[in-house]
């Protein structure tokens, strides 16, 4: 039935997760990317599955195993990730965007390998990629719950607050790349969690202790499940 089950609080819910880096091709042999390993997003997808959800995981290229019982959509570029998210968002009850999406891509993808040709310096022209989370925030319908991440190296709370508001998220999980135990390749994370407050300038802010990405995934999904249950009634 539809009664909430305390062990499977997300039973009957669709959860959409983005994870990993994107690869933005430059020519047939090269691409631009970042240090994301996908660990945080995969931990969230697995936890959502454990809580009974039907999970769609849109993943950039990572070396992690596809979690059992999770519907994985493999993508490379930000544009491919955007397409996959657009296809799954409508049906999603809770969406969590943990991917490290490339903000820019090469303006042109060379058809042939770019040659040195004796040059000492070359310039790459980049164009902006779609902001997938911002698109979801702008197109969310009533009853959908949206959670973003933020990676900062300075002014964490101020920058994260801006993202929470401008991307219309219910929750934003921010981490400082330079905090010990936080960042890309670690199995732990240290995060600051922001929720909309009374006004845009004053979000509700919590500093969470260092914990495994697995435990963090559990706490994040427990909060999101509660929020969603509150919204959905
Ligand atoms: N994000 C996204 N699509 C993009 C860029 C970011 O969906 N093209 C999402 C990320 O998955 C994350 C959130 O937006 O959930 C914040 O990403 P982040 O890189 O920290 O912020 P940006 O808005 O891209 O701003 P900047 O990189 O300039 O700090
Ligand atoms: Ca970015």
Image: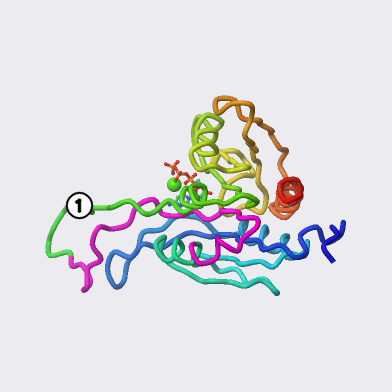
Q: Is 184 left, or right, of 81 in this rendering? A: right
Residue located 28% across and 58% down the image: 106
Dividing the picture into quadrants, the one containing residue 30 is bottom left
Query: Residue 208, percent across and down?
Result: 71, 37
Determine whether 218 is above or below 69 in the image.
Answer: above
Query: Residue 51, percent across and down?
Result: 78, 61
Residue located 75% across and 53% down the image: 218
| Circle 1 SS class | loop
The residue indicated by pointer 1 is 123
Determine whether 86 is above or below 147 in the image.
Answer: below
Q: Is 35 left, or right, of 5 in this rendering? A: left
Residue located 64% across and 40% down the image: 191
The tally of labels here is 1
Query: Residue 172, percent across and down?
Result: 60, 42
Mostly what secondary structure, the magenta segment? loop
Q: Is 117 left, or right, of 36 in this rendering? A: left
Quarter of the picture holding the N terminus: bottom right
What scheme was used to colour the molecule? rainbow
Q: Which residues are magenta?
A: 86-115
Tell which residue pokes out farthest to the left in this image: 118
Q: Is residue 48 magenta?
A: no
Foreground residue, 229 or 70? 229
Mark 1 crowd level (few <14, some 14–19, many ≥20, 10 Å Cα): few
Q: Is 60 left, or right, of 10 in this rendering? A: left
Q: Is residue 110 magenta?
A: yes
Dividing the picture into quadrants, the one containing residue 205 is top right
Dividing the picture into quadrants, the one containing residue 190 is top right
Query: Residue 224, percent across and down?
Result: 71, 49
């Amino acid at each position: 039935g539809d009664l909430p089950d305390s062990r499977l609080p997300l039973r009957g819910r669709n959860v959409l997760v983005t994870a990993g880096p994107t690869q933005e091709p430059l020519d047939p042999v090269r691409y631009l990317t970042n240090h994301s390993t996908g660990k945080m997003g995969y931990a969230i997808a697995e936890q959502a599955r454990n809580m009974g959800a039907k999970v769609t995981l849109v993943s950039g290229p990572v070396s992690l195993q596809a979690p059992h019982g999770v519907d994985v959509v493999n993508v490379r570029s930000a544009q491919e990730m955007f397409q996959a998210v657009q296809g799954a968002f409508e049906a999603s009850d809770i969406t969590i965007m943990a991917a490290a999406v490339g903000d820019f891509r090469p303006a042109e993808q060379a058809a042939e390998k770019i040659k040195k040709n004796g040059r000492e310096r070359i310039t790459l022209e980049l164009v902006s990629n779609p902001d997938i989370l911002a698109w979801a925030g702008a197109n969310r319908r009533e009853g959908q719950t949206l959670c973003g991440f933020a990676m900062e190296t300075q002014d964490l709370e101020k920058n994260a607050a801006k993202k929470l508001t401008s991307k219309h998220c219910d929750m934003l999980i921010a981490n400082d790349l330079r905090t010990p135990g936080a960042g890309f390749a670690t199995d732990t994370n240290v995060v600051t969690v922001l929720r909309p407050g009374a006004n845009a300038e004053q979000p509700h802010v919590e500093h969470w202790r260092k914990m495994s990405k697995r435990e963090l995934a559990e706490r994040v999904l427990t909060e999101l499940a509660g929020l969603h249950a509150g919204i959905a009634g």
